[in-house]
Image (tube, rainbow, N blue to C red):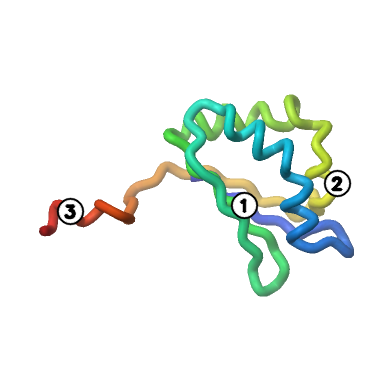
Amino acid sequence: MEITTFKLAKGLIVEDFIAANADIDIWLSRQPGFQSRRIAELDDGSIVDMLIWDSVANGTDAAERIMVEMGHSPVHAVIDQRSVVWRIAKVQRQTGPGSFDHLA
């Protein structure tokens, strides 16, 4: 699981960030191990960008390449780069549809 939090550049809103991600979404969809992405806005205006990968290795590999391969993306201009906090973690437990079938 990859979680990045940040503030937007002054005067911008979450819809600006989402619109600026069109090329990033296409790029992500082509990356090995990419499963899903969620973008959320916290009460203080911070953005939470969460990506689910098949493995830490796939997520780390993509994170290492994205700035080179997608450095031209308009998304970089909408982020206050000084506020970015990026982390990737191995998922230890997952729940969801079918997760509790063994309890039945």
Amino acid type at image mark 1: Asp
The local crowd at label 2, few if under 14, some if 14 to 19, many if 20 or more residues have their Cα within 10 Å, is few
88 is higher (above) or lower (below) than 83: above
Q: Amino acid at mark 2?
A: Ala
The residue at which mark 2 appears reads as 77
**Position in image of residue 104 (x %, y %):** 11, 58
Determine the CA span between mark 2 and mark 1: 16 Å
Q: Is residue 93 above or below residue 13?
A: above
Q: Position of residue 87 (x, y in %)?
A: 57, 46
Q: Residues within 10 Å of mark 1 (few under 14, many from 20)?
A: some
User: Which element carries disc 2, helix, strand or loop?
Assistant: helix
Q: State left or right for residue 30 relative to residue 84.
A: left
The numbered mark, 2 or 1, whose residue comes first in the sequence reads 1
Q: Which residue is mark 1?
A: 49
Residue depicted at 80% across the width and 36% down the height: 73
Label 3: few (<14), some (14–19) or many (≥20) C-alpha neighbours in 10 Å? few
In this rendering, would 88 be left or right of 44? left
Q: Image point 75% across, 26% down: which residue?
A: 68
Say whether disc 3 or disc 2 marks the residue closer to the N-terminus. 2
Image point 88% across, 64% down: which residue? 11
> SS at mark 3?
helix
Disc number lying in front (1 or 3): 3
Residue that extends furthest to the left in the rendered view of this protein: 104
In the rendered structure, find residue 101 and report the number of the disc placed on it. 3
Horizontal and vertical percent for residue 86?
63, 47
